[in-house]
Image (cartoon, helix red, strand yellow):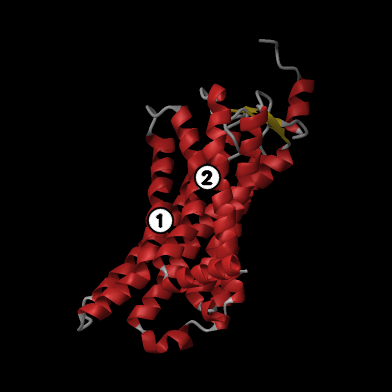
Amino acid sequence: LPETTPAMYNLSNDHTGDFTLLGIPGLGQYHVWISIPFCFIYLAAIVGNSILLYLIAVEHSLHAPMFFFLSMLAMTDLILSTTCVPKTLTIFWLGPQKISFPGCLTQLFFLHCSFVLDSAILMAMAFDRYVAICSPLRYTTILTPRTIIKIAVGISFRSFCIILPVVFLLTRLPFCRTRIIPHTYCEHIGVARLACADISVNIWYGFGVPIMTVISDVILIAVSYSLILRAVFRLPSRDARHKALGTCGSHVCVILMFYTPAFFSILAHRFGHNVSRTFHILFANLYIVIPPALNPIVYGVKTKQIRDKVIFLFSTKAME
């Protein structure tokens, strides 16, 4: 290998060079075939979440706290998938693609921020269900429009503050070696590992702070549902118990779809040294597109108010 000169070091250290996203290592010859289901799932996510946002916006009966948080979830899912998928499809169709350093930072910021915000929204939705089932008579006085806006602003600001330091941790690093990223999108540790400097701060912050934040969300969700289950099983009639559990069914499904693959991916990335890089990256790509596509389907099937509005919407269009 040629010796790295000071000029080369400075050129790379001033962050003017582009990075190259390779795609999924080892599956380059299958990229076009992988893109077909990937594209359809992404379109399903766009259409499903857009319909959900439209219904919640125009239907007065859906102007309730639960549906406000659901609209936040739909919007965040759209940001999560749209941040990465268009670039990924370009790589699948046209081969390795270049991305500027600011573009890379922007992509990973919105990716990680959307993930942390998704987790916070699920926590807020668990609190909403807790109040609705455990204190139904006080529901409208506890979750006032002002309180809901405070919660929305608070969890959004928290996500912003948690992920913003990641951008500064990366801008301080010199990139004097390769700028080739064996992935379909930029993510914090993947970019940091290309640096020719100590990245221990990046690893500890990138792994520790967001994970502790998400774990705290999971604990609060678990506490909420423990209290919900205790309240439900104290209800006198079987029908009342079934109805109360039914209102939580869609939320529990979405929680499992979000956290199960997330924790698997994070733990496999950190400790699964025997898991191939190809599997890691393929799984990471599925994760940014499948939950956003399934969430509106789950809520559409399991939530009666939304199901009825969707049926009415499409039956009206068919009659026209």
Find disc 1 in the rendering and name its residue: 215
> Is 137 left or right of 82, judged from the image as shown?
left
Helix, strand or loop at mark 1: helix
- Dot 2: within a 10 Å radius of its alpha carbon, few (fewer than 14), some, or many (20 or more) residues? many
Find disc 2 in the rendering and name its residue: 206
Quadrant where the C terminus lies? bottom right
For this rendering, which residue is in front, 319 or 182?
319
> If you read the primary sequence from the N terminus, does the residue marked by circle 1 or circle 2 appear first?
2
Image position, residue 127 (x, y; %): 42, 72
Q: Quadrant of residue 12?
A: top right
Residue 313 in view (yes/no): yes
Residue 158 in view (yes/no): no
Rounded to the nearest angstrom, the CA distance separating label 1 from label 2 is 14 Å
Image position, residue 10 (x, y; %): 77, 27
Image position, residue 137 (x, y; %): 38, 89
**Residue 119: mark:** none
Image position, residue 119 (x, y; %): 47, 58
- Dot 1: within a 10 Å radius of its alpha carbon, few (fewer than 14), some, or many (20 or more) residues? some
The amino acid type of the residue labelled 2 equals Gly
